[in-house]
Image (cartoon, helix red, strand yellow):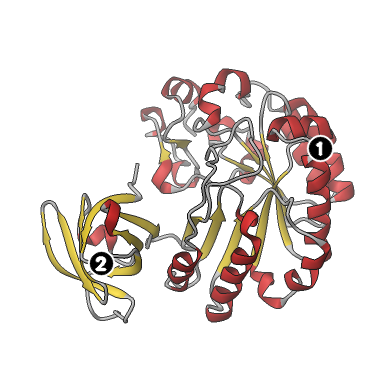
Amino acid sequence: MIPLALQSISEAEQPFVTRLRVATGTADAADSILVAEDIDGATFAGRNGLVSISGSPAAALDGDVVLVSSGVGRVERLLRAGGLEIPTNTLLVTERCDQLCLMCSQPPKKTHHDRFALLTEAALLAEPGSLIGITGGEPTLYKAQLLDMIETVLAARSDVEFHVLTNGQHFEDADVARLAGALYDRVTWGVPLYARQAALHDRIVGKKGAFDRLQDGLAVLLSAGCRVELRTVLLSSNFTALGELARYVTTRLRFVEAWSIMQLENVGYARKRWQELYLDHSADFGPIAAALDHAHLHGVEAQLFNFPLCTVPAPYRHLARPSISDWKRKFVPECSPCAARERCCGFFEWHPDDEARSGVRPL
């Protein structure tokens, strides 16, 4: 697992954002340049003074955009540089949320620490061609700050796009004109929809009336011509209802950009409820296959996230995306001989080893 937070010592009294550089050839005013390195870590110097980082060689940090918080002695790697064809990172803008999903991977907190100004600085330093994810909590609880940040970055960086995860319940008719602006052509809104039945969706998200509010929010987004990706986490409670949801998506929401069916992540609330919530799709892929077939037949782009390739029937493997980020992805020893490993999402680092190892069938 790749650490995203490292110990540090800084001269600055206030948190600041900087991009770490090993060489000076491409440096600008926002960069901190390597001045020393030893077996314990590396020291960089920039306009905010010196910052020493432990636990990683300088070469592994080169190009990373980091948030230095001197008071807590920590550096957060907000935007990691790397070799992906499309650089992809995710920014956590709040840990507050107005839902309490049964399987939430990021259990919400009651407090909010506003970092929008710092995160805007970071996004402006992103690698060329970056796709920046925005997540929470619920980002649109701070809708004004969120939209200001998106517009500031996109106006300055024509090569950057955003993907925002949101429960979709805080958009209003008054937002349509703003969201219809040209800058939002480079924003995709990832919105969870867990069931066609309002009662089932509301029970999963832990909020009465959530389904109805979500329909209103989706209407705003689609009226504005926004790019929308629907997300459905696979659970034991909604597995047999996928067919009805597929019919709803293709009749009422067919203009979405994609529909992502996602396997459960064993972290957060799901860890304690794993046996209750988890559905082994390799034991019965039928309802998933039927939902995928129905979606594609009606022109909706459906895809699979967090499904290892060998657990998916061959006719549907091309729909399984390498969706798990490298910093939290693992492969078990049984994966070693697999010829498809480079195209596979693998498993979440915290997925139970016994379940992962028993389910692997190298391709």
Identify residue for label 1: 245
What percent of the width, then of the height, locates residue 166? 65, 51
* Residue at image point 46% right, 62% down: 87
- Examine the rendered structure and indicate whether residue 333 appears above or below residue 324: above
Give 312 or 347, whichever is nearer the viewer. 347
* Residue at image point 73% right, 36% down: 207
- Left or right of 70 in this view: 178: right
The three-letter code of the residue at mark 1 reads Leu
* Mark closest to the chain's N terminus, 2 or 1: 2
Which part of the image, by quadrant, shows the N terminus?
A: top left
Of helix, strand and loop, which one carries label 2? loop
What percent of the width, then of the height, locates residue 212? 84, 43
* Foreground label between 2 and 1: 2
Identify residue for label 2: 12
- Left or right of 275 in this view: 329: left
Q: How many neighbours does mark 2 have within 10 angstroms: few (below 14), some (14-19), or many (20 or more)? A: some
State the residue lying farthest toward the right.
251
What percent of the width, then of the height, locates residue 42? 17, 60
- Residue 297 in view of the camera: no
- Left or right of 91 in this view: 238: right
